Image (cartoon, rainbow, N blue to C red):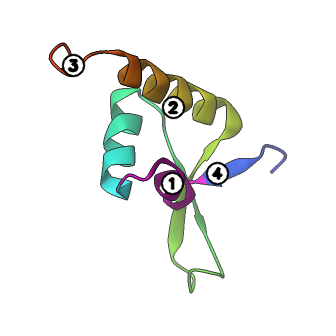
């Protein structure tokens, strides 16, 4: 694969959030994950997103931090 992938686990650690929260935001933004088996995870499938989708996710978090808590839904 030529595109650079980032695991959802790493995203959760980077943002200081739970994996489930990251998955909910990805679903809300209609970003699909790519699942691949990982030898580091003992053959279990790990969810990844590409760099372009990461930029969308990052922009979402920036916008959410700028909106006051009372207005958020």
Relative to 58, say whether 68 is above or below: above
Q: CA distance from mark 3 to mark 4?
A: 27 Å
Q: CA distance from mark 4 to mark 1?
A: 7 Å
* Side of 69 relative to 1 (left or right): left
> What residue is pinned by disc 2?
57
* Side of 52 relative to 2 (left or right): left
> What residue is pinned by disc 1?
8
Query: Dot 2, crowdedness within 10 Å: few (<14), some or many (≥20)?
Result: some
Q: Nearer the viewer, mark 3 or mark 4?
A: 3
Relative to 8, say whether 3 is above or below: above
> Which disc is residue 6 wearing?
4
Q: Quadrant of residue 73?
A: top left
The part of the chain drawn in magenta is 7-17
Q: Nearest the camera: 67 or 44? A: 67
Sooner in the amino-acid sequence: mark 3 or mark 4: 4
Cβ–Cβ below 8 Å for labels 3 and 1? Answer: no
Query: Dot 1, crowdedness within 10 Å: few (<14), some or many (≥20)?
Result: many
* Side of 1 relative to 43 (left or right): right
Q: Secondary structure at mark 2?
A: helix
Q: Nearer the viewer, mark 3 or mark 1?
A: 3
Q: Position of residue 58 (x, y in %)?
A: 54, 31
Q: Nearest the camera: 36 or 53? A: 53
Q: Quadrant of residue 43?
A: bottom right
Decide whether residue 9 is among the magenta residues.
yes
Cβ–Cβ below 8 Å for labels 4 and 1? Answer: yes
Q: Quadrant of residue 27?
A: top left
Query: Dot 3, crowdedness within 10 Å: few (<14), some or many (≥20)?
Result: few
Sooner in the amino-acid sequence: mark 2 or mark 3: 2
Sooner in the amino-acid sequence: mark 2 or mark 4: 4
Image point 60% across, 36% down: which residue?
54
Q: Secondary structure at mark 3?
A: loop
């Amino acid at each position: 694969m030529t595109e650079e992938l980032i695991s959802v686990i790493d995203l959760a650690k980077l943002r200081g959030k739970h994996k489930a929260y990251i998955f909910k935001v990805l679903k809300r933004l209609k970003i699909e994950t790519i699942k691949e088996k990982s030898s580091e995870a003992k053959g279990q499938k790990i969810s990844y997103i590409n760099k372009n989708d990461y930029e969308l996710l990052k922009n979402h978090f920036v916008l959410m931090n700028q909106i006051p808590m009372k207005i958020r839904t």
